[in-house]
Amino acid sequence: VKAAARHGLKLRQNYNREAPRLARQIGRYAHAKQYKRMKKALRTLRSRVGLRRGITHGLRAMSRRRSAIEPAIGHMKADGKLDRNWLKGALG
């Protein structure tokens, strides 16, 4: 429910009550090692809340920005002699 609210999805009222109940149920099934039932409840929860697999638009944009900046950071480190300190060993 909180994830849906964060992404701006409006849920029907009964889903707002059903999602926390399903989440508790999933935890109970996992604890009792009833994995088939857990998977079914998890599938139901995902369909109710509307979670989709994969990377979100915001995360994709952040990774693109990061990958664009990464080579520049690497060159600055190499040119400015900011590599590992080989005197400190493997962690240096």
Image (spheres, rainbow, N blue to C red):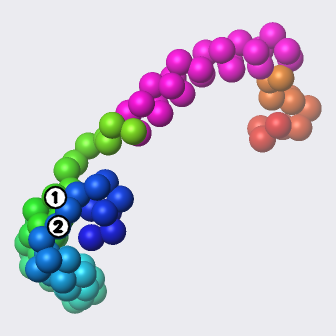
Task: Please say if 58 is above or below 33.
Answer: above
Looking at the rendered image, the quarter that the C terminus falls into is: top right
Residue at point 80% right, 23% down?
83
Q: Is residue 27 visible?
A: yes
> On the picture, is 37 further left or further right than 10?
left
Disc 2 element:
loop
Q: Is residue 39 visible?
A: no
* Numbered disc in front, either 1 or 2: 2
Which corner quadrant of the image does residue 56 belong to? Answer: top left
Q: Amino acid at mark 2?
A: Leu
> On the picture, is 82 further left or further right than 43?
right
The dot on residue 50 is: 1
CA–CA distance in space, label 1 to label 2: 9 Å
Disc 1 element:
loop
| Sequence-first disc among 1 and 2 | 2
Q: How many marks?
A: 2
Residue at point 53% right, 18% down?
68
User: Pointer 1 and pointer 2: residues touching (CB < 8 Å)?
Assistant: yes
What range of the chain is rendered magenta?
59-81
Q: Is residue 39 magenta?
A: no
Q: Which residue bears the numbered disc 2?
A: 11
Task: Measuring from the top left, give residue 6's x and y in whole percent.
Answer: 35, 59
The dot on residue 80 is: none
Q: Amino acid at mark 1?
A: Gly
Q: Nearer the viewer, residue 6 or 63?
A: 6
Residue at point 68% right, 18% down?
74
Which corner quadrant of the image does residue 80 belong to? Answer: top right
Prevailing secondary structure of the magenta residues: helix
